[in-house]
């Protein structure tokens, strides 16, 4: 189980996360929706410790980090926590001069210190899983956006994270490539992977989410099942947001 308590984060004077509380059960898929600038990316980056919260608490399993304005958690604890999360970025962020296979192997070899042969076997399995076994030796520029993103997903899975975070994984893709990426994410959901996904794809959100969270201006406005939040939102801000998407 993953817990986020009273998480706050400011960039200078600008408070971007203003006290976020969320619980994600093992095997659950949480979809976060909300207007641009509401803090969705910052929240994911905080859980992945790419940003350092100003206040609050994060826990995954037995690993716990407390943040206060005066103290930072020690670096070893941060690293141990980060290793339990994997992130899939909007713009893929693959290493351009490494093949698909090398991209998937990288963190396993460098971060996890896994022997190369073992990492290679696992990475080929993951590339097979995302339908890209035949593209193992291709470089990112030889792949379509959808294929690059599927490599990104395989890479994030390489270190066996307890939690996978997706930051608008299809928003950089041409419309005809969105489906292949969503299909892979749906398959992972079906296998019981715990995931938090920021997306504007409402049909996908309805299909895949156990919980939908609507964020605006650094706070959670409402959360519930997809039916509750997307079909029958309680708050005017949610209704307005959803009506603008259509
Ligand atoms: P969303 O993902 O919902 O579009 P973001 O988390 O990207 O929102 O951004 C929330 C707010 O934080 C925005 O006002 C944005 O300009 C600001 N912000 C994000 N990253 C930084 C940063 N590194 N430095 C300063 N401000 C930032």
Image (cartoon, rainbow, N blue to C red):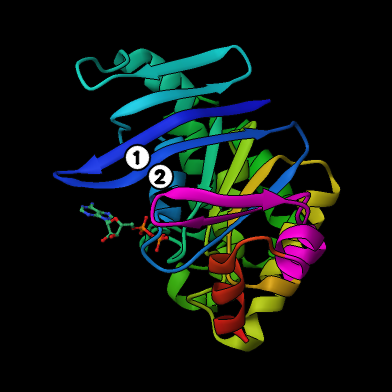
Q: CA distance from mark 1 to mark 2?
A: 5 Å
Task: Give the label on residue 45, or none.
Answer: 2
In the image as oriented, which residue stretches furthest toward the right? 190
Please name whichever residue, 138 or 180, is drawn nearer the observer in this view of the structure.
Answer: 180
Please name whichever residue, 25 or 76, is drawn nearer the observer in this view of the structure.
Answer: 25
User: On the picture, is 115 further left or further right than 111?
Assistant: right
In the image as oriented, which residue stretches furthest toward the left? 12
Give SS at disc 1.
Answer: loop
User: On the picture, is 45 further left or further right than 23?
Assistant: left
Image quarter for ligand 1 equals bottom left
Q: Position of residue 19 (x, y in %)?
A: 42, 36
User: On the picture, is 83 further left or further right than 232?
Assistant: left
Q: Position of residue 145 (x, y in %)?
A: 53, 76
Q: Is residue 226 magenta?
A: yes
Q: Quadrant of residue 134?
A: bottom right
User: On the picture, is 55 further left or further right than 110?
Assistant: left
Give SS at disc 2.
Answer: helix
Residue beneath the point at 55% across and 86% down: 174
Q: Quadrant of residue 207?
A: bottom right
Q: Position of residue 155 (x, y in %)?
A: 56, 48
Q: Is the shortest distance between ligand 1 and the CB of mark 2 under 8 Å?
A: yes
Return the residue at label 1. Answer: 50
Residue beneath the point at 67% across and 68% down: 181
User: Callout 1: few (<14), some (14-19), or many (20+) C-alpha neighbours within 10 Å?
Assistant: few
Residue beneath the point at 46% across and 46% down: 44
Residue beneath the point at 75% across and 41% down: 193
- In the rendered image, the vertical position of residue 69 relative to residue 97, given as above or below: above
Q: Is residue 43 visible?
A: yes
User: First in sequence: mark 1 or mark 2?
Assistant: 2
Q: Is there a contact, CB below 8 Å, between mark 1 and mark 2?
A: yes
Q: Is residue 151 magenta?
A: no
């Amino acid at each position: 189980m993953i817990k986020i308590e009273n998480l706050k984060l400011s960039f200078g004077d600008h408070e971007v996360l203003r006290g976020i509380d969320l619980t994600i059960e093992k095997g659950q898929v949480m979809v976060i929706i909300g207007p641009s600038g509401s803090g969705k990316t910052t929240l994911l980056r905080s859980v992945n410790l790419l940003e350092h919260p100003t206040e609050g608490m994060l826990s995954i399993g037995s690993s716990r980090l407390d943040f206060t304005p005066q103290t930072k958690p020690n670096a070893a604890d941060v690293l141990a926590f980060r290793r339990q999360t994997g992130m899939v970025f909007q713009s893929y962020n693959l290493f351009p001069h490494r093949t698909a296979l090398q991209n998937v192997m990288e963190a396993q070899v460098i971060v996890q210190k896994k022997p190369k042969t073992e990492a290679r076997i696992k990475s080929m399995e993951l590339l097979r899983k995302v339908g890209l076994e035949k593209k193992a030796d291709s470089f990112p520029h030889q792949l379509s956006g959808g294929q690059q993103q599927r490599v990104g997903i395989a890479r994030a899975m390489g270190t066996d994270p307890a939690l996978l975070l997706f930051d608008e994984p299809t928003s950089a893709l041409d419309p005809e490539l969105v489906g292949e990426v969503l299909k892979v994410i749906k398959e992972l959901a079906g296998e019981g992977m715990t995931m938090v996904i920021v997306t504007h794809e409402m049909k996908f959100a309805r299909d895949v989410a156990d919980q939908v969270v609507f964020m605006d201006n650094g706070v959670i406005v409402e959360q519930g099942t997809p039916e509750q939040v997307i079909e029958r939102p309680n708050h005017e801000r949610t209704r307005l947001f959803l009506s603008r998407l259509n």
